[in-house]
Amino acid sequence: MTRDERLARIVLDVARRGSIATREAADLCDVEMRVVRDDLAHLARRRTLQVVGKGIHRRYTLHKQLSEEALPPYDRMSLLVGREVTRFLRETPAFAASDAPSELLHQRVRYVSEPARSYAGQTALVDRLLTALVGTKAIRFTYDGPSGPKPWPSAWPLLLMVYRRALFLVVRAGRRDYTLSVDRMGDLEVLGRFEWPTDWDPDAWLDGRFGIVATADAPPEPIELEFTAEVAHLVRARRWHPSQELTTLRDGRVRLTMMARGMELVRFVMEWGDTCKVIGPASLREEVIGEHRRALAAYGEEP
């Protein structure tokens, strides 16, 4: 076990149990007392742990000043995103109370992701973007849209999102909010500070959306989808939207209803092929039918 692994194990154990003695730390890491004393002294100097008590009552606890703010920005962001990905573990007390070491968890618990978007060559751009976002500063950049790169002379970065293993940014330009894909941004410059808009609420912005792409002013509307009995168990196994309601029909079919909005609803329906049918609204039904017709045409087939 390396020193870094020992330090991590000690801190995790203290976070779980509340405190640790020198002998307990030595047993935990299976090292001599002199080695673990150096480890504990190192953690105390870094203000990760603090000493409480004296003599035989001497123990180490988490330092009173220790918080997420003491972590580097990368680690803080990793914790934030990781918590969202592993939100389901909050309802598993047995796992939360586990004292399994990090190396064991790494071998037995993995996050298997879908293909990630590459940001090779954009390290400096992402760094400047984060600087502007945290510092409440406007940005100037170019954006590669359908008709080619266009300049954005000034915009306020409001929200950075990690979605489907890619980065998306909500900016305000003029009086409108836009959702941009970070990989299409270029020549980004950080400008002066702006006054944070009091009417901006990320929860309200996300409310009702199915995915992240939606017409800004379009309110959520009743969505009604019907799935065949063949895939009913798959539909019931997930929570597709916060507002969803599931109804099991007599022949085993499942009806999914929700109040939602967003352009990704079409993609969601298409992914289920002939096992999903749009009941309403009529506009979504027509969009899906149109996509199926265009797909048939691409293969030279008549609708």
Image (cartoon, rainbow, N blue to C red):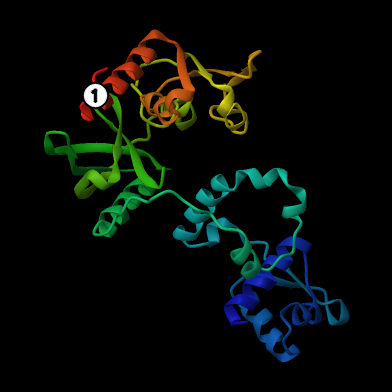
Q: Residue at x 64, y 43 (%)?
A: 88
Front position in the image: 265 or 79: 265
| Secondary structure at numbered mark 1 | loop
Q: Amino acid at mark 1?
A: Glu
Q: Is residue 234 left or right of residue 128?
A: right
Quadrant housing the N terminus: bottom right
Quadrant housing the C terminus: top left
Front position in the image: 128 or 121: 121
Q: Looking at this view, name the residue that lies furthest to the right.
A: 56
Q: Is residue 93 left or right of residue 71?
A: right
Q: Within 10 Å of the Cα at label 1, are there few (<14), some (14-19), or many (20+) other Cα atoms?
A: few
Q: Residue at x 71, y 62 (%)?
A: 15
Q: Is residue 167 left or right of residue 88?
A: left
Q: Looking at this view, name the residue that lies furthest to the top.
A: 282
x then y, percent, for residue 290: 29, 18
| Vertical relation: 161 (above or below) 227 | below
**Number of numbered tags placed on the structure image:** 1
Q: Residue at x 54, y 57 (%)?
A: 69
Badge 1 is on which residue?
Answer: 301
x then y, percent, for residue 251: 63, 15
